[in-house]
Amino acid sequence: MAQKRLLRSASRLGASSASQRAAETITDVTSISTRDSSSKANETIDGRPSIEAGVVECASASPSKKRKVASARNLASETIPLQRPAGTHSTSTPLKTPQGPHVIACMEGGLNESTSETGGPRLTISTNRLLEQACAHLIQADSRLQPLIEKHHCHLFSPEGLAEVVDPFESLCSSIMAQQVSGAAASSIKAKFIGLFFGKEEERAQEGIFFPSPAQIAPCDVAFLRTAGLSARKAEYIKGLAQQFVDGELTTAMLIKASDEDIIKKLTAVRGLGLWSVQMFACFALRRTDIFSTGDLGVRRGMAALMGKNVQKLRANKGGKWKYMSENDMLQYSAKFAPYRYAEWYF
């Protein structure tokens, strides 16, 4: 159950494989980092986004204009290679820039020694061996994990999983939409939200459009966004998040280069994103290997079970959220898994 819960969390983050999405342009992070906030909407019509430079699309745009926008956003290029440099404290999956068709990937030479001096780690692992090295480390740290690791293949950190292109803005919006609602309700709200900008699902699939950009959402009225089924507060959160991407407060380049601590600090400062949501995003969307969430109920239960505790008995007790294991005990036990504390996925 714990694993299924984390898998549902991961799926809500909007990760999508390169084979499912249109081909993306792979660009060195150092040459694209300034493009994240280059496209902005300068005009609204009744609170809805207008067309600007073929990037911002009005909800009432004609099919021909939609096709032009789709074409601009889905330039054909090469696919993501399975073997690339990666780091234990860095984003290991390619990220799509919310304002355009580009993808920032940790390609050879993209992050260098000077990057580590500014907060980002040096690249020390190849993506085609990351999972193999991680599993060996976890089994050595605690042999009781071996049956779980052998039974449950962790696709997220496999070479194929690490080649999946993730739109970080879509992922964070999906996380906000999913708060305090069922998975089915969250999916319905997201589909309606996308429909506000792009029309029917069949048309979107044909044109390769998957989620509106920050520049499309930021100018919209909260009342307009709420017509997708969002609460007023969630609509405000998503609008505010979009504005931060538009203003350059949040960028794809930052999500690639920043340390785990800086990403958590930066994102938890955004209204609507709590610590658990940000940790799930960092682990399952950004594929950062050393994220560990003591606040996740499934992780607490799974870890307690691995330690030999009677989880069913503890569940019946009144002891608050730490009745399975204390936060301090969880941190002490998980320390030996570093830098692969994504081991929480197995719990």
Image (spheres, rainbow, N blue to C red):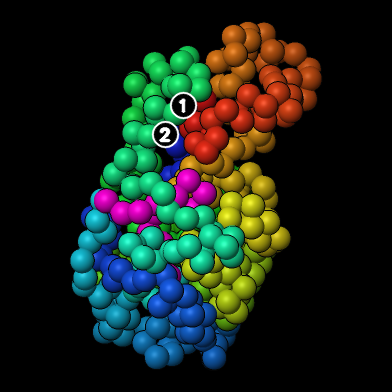
State the SS at label 2.
helix
Instruction: Give the magenta part as a residue range.
Output: 83-97
| 318, above or below 131, in the image | above
| 74, above or below 268, in the image | below
| Residue of label 1 | 138
Examine the rendering and report whether any part of residue 153 can be seen. Answer: yes
Quarter holding residue 237 = bottom right
Badge 1 density bin: few <14, some 14–19, many ≥20, Cα 10 Å: many
| 313, above or below 318, in the image | above
Left-right relation of 82 to 312 = left
Badge 2 density bin: few <14, some 14–19, many ≥20, Cα 10 Å: many
Residues at marks 1 and 2, CA–CA distance in whole angstroms: 6 Å
Q: Nearer the viewer, residue 55 or 285?
A: 285
Left-right relation of 54 to 77 = right
Left-right relation of 84 to 42 = left
Q: Are marks 1 and 2 in contact (CB under 8 Å)?
A: yes
State the SS at label 1.
helix
Q: Which mark is residue 134?
A: 2
At 33% across and 47% down in the image, what residue appears? 127
Q: Nearer the viewer, residue 75 or 239?
A: 75
